[in-house]
Amino acid sequence: MSGDPYQDTRGNRDASIANPKGAGALRPSPGTGQVMDTGSAFLIGDTMTGGYGAGPDILHDCTIAVNPGEIAVIVGPNGAGKSTAMKAVFGMLNVRQGSVRLDGEDITSLSPQDRVSKGMGFVPQTSNIFTSMTVEENLEMGAFIRRDDFRSTMAQVYDLFPILKEKRNQAAGELSGGQRQQVAVGRALMTQPKVLMLDEPTAGVSPIVMDELFDRIIEVARTGIPILMVEQNARQALEIADKGYVLVQGRNAFTGTGKELLADPEVRKSFLGG
């Protein structure tokens, strides 16, 4: 790979690390249970109602969606169902009503493993690396579903996260929290995902590391990969978001662009500290 497509500009269009397809406009409407124009969105969790196992519903008519090259952020108070919505899209809980669609295909009934094969990359908040394996071995594990030569993808991951190349022979468990998150994201990228899902990627890291991770997330999105992200640092996340979803008690409370939500007085008062 020539040059450094990830570091040269924030607006590069190198899509070779991904396998992006699809297009369409997403024009969500705010408010609990409101109809949203998500019919042409690339990844859609559409009016999802459901919960874990036989337990009560946690999500209620919840809709989240993202298009290629966009960053969609799910924010809200603790216990609002943010991570639950993410897990519903990934197939980790029962969706009793509504559907999940990827690139026009209904995948509601598929297992998480099958969704990975369809092109979903998921990075959980915790236990997201193999601590006893080296950095490079972690990345190789990310390519387990591939049958082609993945060395060029690994080179791209190293370009995106230079510290990982420097520490590629070091046990991942010896890395800092921010570096571990880079390993987790890098391993998900090794699958050449159509969409990347991140659950609290900056949890427990310093503000400086958080800013660096957000910069790298922007760079991934610029390659064309849609990114759906749950984030507790709401203000910072909305600053980089193309779409934002504020959930309250498992329902859509506010929806709009990141800038719109940051400027909304009610959102600022209730969720951003004024």
Image (spheres, grey):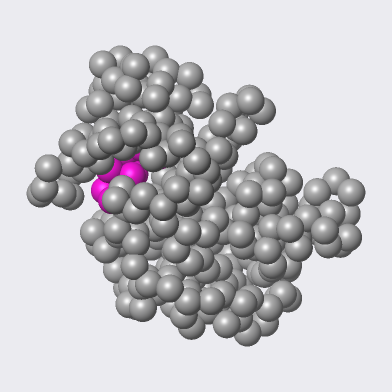
Residue visible at 50% across and 24% down in the picture: 177
Q: Which quadrant would residue 94 be assigned to in this image?
A: bottom left
Residue at point 22%, 27% (across, down): 137
Residue 224 pos. (x, y %) = 42, 57
Q: Quadrant of the N terminus?
A: top left
Compared with residue 199, is residue 104 higher up or lower down, i.e. above or below? below
Q: Is residue 239 left or right of residue 221?
A: right
Residue 28 visible in image: yes
- In the rendered image, which quarter is residue 123 located in? top left
Residue found at x 26% / y 16%? 169
Q: Position of residue 135 (x, y in %)?
A: 30, 24
96 or 174, which lies in front? 174
- Left or right: 177 in relation to 166: right
**Which residues, given as a range, are shown in magenta?**
185-192
- What count of labels does the image hold? 0
Overall secondary structure of the magenta section: helix
- Residue at the (12%, 42%) spot, across then down: 149
Where residue 81 appears, as percent x and y from the top left, is 61, 58
Residue 247 in the image: x percent, y percent?
Answer: 67, 62
* Closer-to-camera residue (22/198): 22
Describe residue 173's horizontal placement relative to residue 204 as left or right. left
Q: Is residue 46 above or below residue 117?
A: below
